[in-house]
Amino acid sequence: MSGQPNTRLADLFGLAGWSKGELARLVNRQAAALGHLQLATDTSRVRRWIDMGEIPRDPVPRVLAALFTERLGRVVTIEDLGLVRHGRAGKRRGGGSEEHPDGVPWAPERTAAVLTEFTGMDLMLNRRGLVGAGAVLAAGSALSNAMHDWLHTDPILSADAPVVGRPFVQAEPAGYDRYEAAPVGAAEVDELESSVEVFRAWDAARGGGLQRKAVVGQLNEVGGMLAYRHPPHLQRRLWGVAANLAVLAGWMSHDVGLEPTAQKYFVIAAHAAREGGDRPRAGEALSRAARQMVHLGRPDDALDLMKLAQSGSGEQVLPRTRAMFHTIEAWAQASMGRSQAVRRTLGQAEDLFVSDKSDVPPPSWMQLFNEADLYGMQALAYRTLAEFEPGAAAHAQHYADKALALRADAQERSKIFDFLSMASACFIADDPEQADRFARLALVSMGQNSSRRTWDRLRQMYRLTAEYTGSPSIGELREEIRQALPKTKAKAKGGSGDSAWL
């Protein structure tokens, strides 16, 4: 017992709207259903959890996490409730201290447990038809401060780690299904790695909504596998699969507007990648969180995350990966109207991209960042900058045209973003005829795609059509867009779209 109020639990308790007596009865009922008949929580006990920082014994934290998850309609973990024992307080760079946001970074032995718990809760929400958009995004500076020292050090496996065949975590989780952990061999890991490629291709073609639950379920299973200590070469590969699936789960969640859930998956992916010794992958996971921040109108947070992604990726990062990082940084700068910085950063991205001699095969997660994606991100950055500097629209048109010429048919979502970048740039450049053509090309494809980000981007383009309402063709286009837009809107703050390679 800390003697200090548990502010995390207090805040969520206030949101849930229970009385202390109601929560005590719910805990007892849920625990009894799990076979813990001896548990007898009462109002005074709940008060001590909230007001005195008392941490209840297992299974109560897991029961509480399940109850709050169902009540609030979003994933709530034990960390979110402030009920983790032996929590570590971190020091801010430059002095001072702060509690790590969202419980990060957590101890290495906790990564598999956090992964399994979070995915299990996410699956429970999916199964019950609830949504997970009620949480708050952590600021980019808070995440980068908390994770800086951790990401810049090599992972150290605990000296008393369980031997092969003994799981890290023995207790059964409460309130959701859990994959029964078992050791796996090389053949099973091969199949898991292949499944990542299948999910990745489907996401690129159709958007994140249709396969998100399958990806989260697969990640949940991998978390169960990681509860066992495998031989080092297999353990590293399993961590790699976990990182890839977590990035994909995060990207799909972002694609359908589950923003806090997406951010949590990106953080989980960074942890998993680092546990597997792949610091470039950890950096790329954080760069996804940065792209999310730009889309949501928070470019300053994105730049904080990109500094950490680039510095924490280590010396092994390939030039093409660094080029990708620079395109994200340029997009954030464009969202702030920093013209010179955008041009300088995109120039560096081009130099890095062409300097990659391809003598080292790129990792699987970088293979889809090709020339088309480089051009697509340049088009996006210049189209965003054109809001502040209309002359940048010509550059956006140039690069969008080059991206579209190279796009593979399988990258349907990226094509939509390129069409919308081109249409927006044409409107800004006072070429409504060309803008109309590309906007209609985007509309034709959007009905077959489950990406909500494409609709966010379409709304941004729709705003630019207002100047041409006197044109009959643009008037028709505006009406078609109004008819096509989903009836339930959840507009991303300041979102200007994206051009994704995953």
Image (cartoon, rainbow, N blue to C red):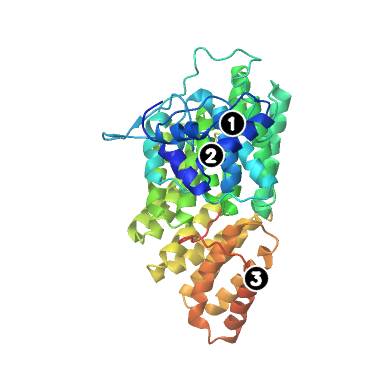
In the image, what residue type sits under mark 2? Gly
Question: What is the quadrant of the N terminus in the image?
Answer: top left
Task: Give the label on residue 21, or none.
Answer: 2
On the image, the x and y values in percent for residue 387 come to 41, 68
Quick check: 253 left or right of 192?
left
Q: Which of disc 2 and disc 1 is earlier in sequence?
A: 2
Task: Give the label on residue 24, or none.
Answer: none
Gap in Å between the C-alphas at discs 3 and 1? Answer: 40 Å
On the image, the x and y values in percent for residue 43 come to 50, 35
Determine whether label 3 and label 1 are within 8 Å by CB: no
Q: Residues within 10 Å of mark 3 (few under 14, many from 20)?
A: few
Identify which residue, 360 or 76, lies in the foreground.
76
On the image, the x and y values in percent for residue 464 come to 49, 74
Identify which residue, 73 or 313, lies in the foreground.
73
Q: Does 83 appear above or below 413?
A: above
Q: In the image as oriented, which residue stretches furthest toward the left?
A: 95
Q: Secondary structure at mark 2?
A: helix
Gap in Å between the C-alphas at discs 2 and 3? Answer: 48 Å
Task: Give the label on residue 484, or none.
Answer: 3
Within the image, what quadrant is residue 61 found in? Answer: top right
Identify which residue, 111 or 498, lies in the foreground.
111
